[in-house]
Amino acid sequence: QVQLVESGGGLVQAGGSLRLSCAASGSIFSINAITWYRRAPGKQRELVAKITSGGSTNYADSVKGRFTISRDSANTVSLEMNTLKPEDTAIYSCNAETNWSSYWGQGTQVTVSS
């Protein structure tokens, strides 16, 4: 079992920055990858950024060059978001993949005002 808790969301003006954190507990050494997803009102959930246990990363085209995913410690992954746009407004959730399951946090709201 893996438990995930997101933090760091909030309200920011366009052009500003936020840093989200995803803290994992439980069987953290079974995690193969952690992915940040977001869901905007009226839209489908989309992958934002992913980091594997080996450190490989990939990003949605819409956030490349603005967002950076990184592993801060054995149990914490961060998403640094710069040059935020109103279209980045969404609930951001982290997901942990293991060999046998997938786990979700509760999500954190990010609102970017124009």
Image (tube, rainbow, N blue to C red):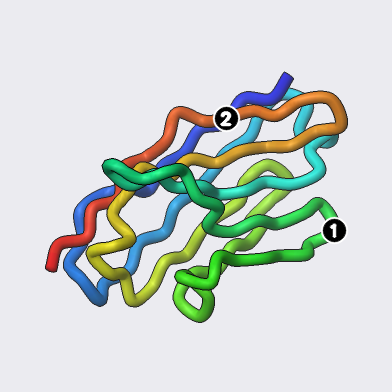
Residue 46 placed where, x, y %? 50, 50
64 to the left or right of 109: right
Please name the residue shown 67% across and 46% down the image.
34
Residue 86 placed where, x, y %? 23, 64
Q: Earlier in the sequence, mark 2 or mark 1?
A: 1
**Foreground residue, 101 or 71?**
101
At label 1, the amino acid type is Gly
**Foreground residue, 40 or 8?**
40
Query: At numbered mark 2, what does the secondary structure look like: helix, strand or loop?
Result: strand
The residue identified by callout 2 is 104
User: Which of the image's four quarters has the C terminus?
Assistant: bottom left
Please name the residue shown 47% across and 38% down the image.
6
**Foreground residue, 106 or 89?**
89
Q: CA distance from mark 2 to mark 1?
A: 20 Å
At label 2, the amino acid type is Trp
In this view, the residue farthest toward the bottom is 65
Label 1 neighbour load within 10 Å: few <14, some 14-19, many 20+: few
The residue identified by callout 1 is 54
Q: Is residue 98 above or below residue 16?
A: above
In this view, the residue farthest toward the top is 1
Residue 24 placed where, x, y %? 63, 34
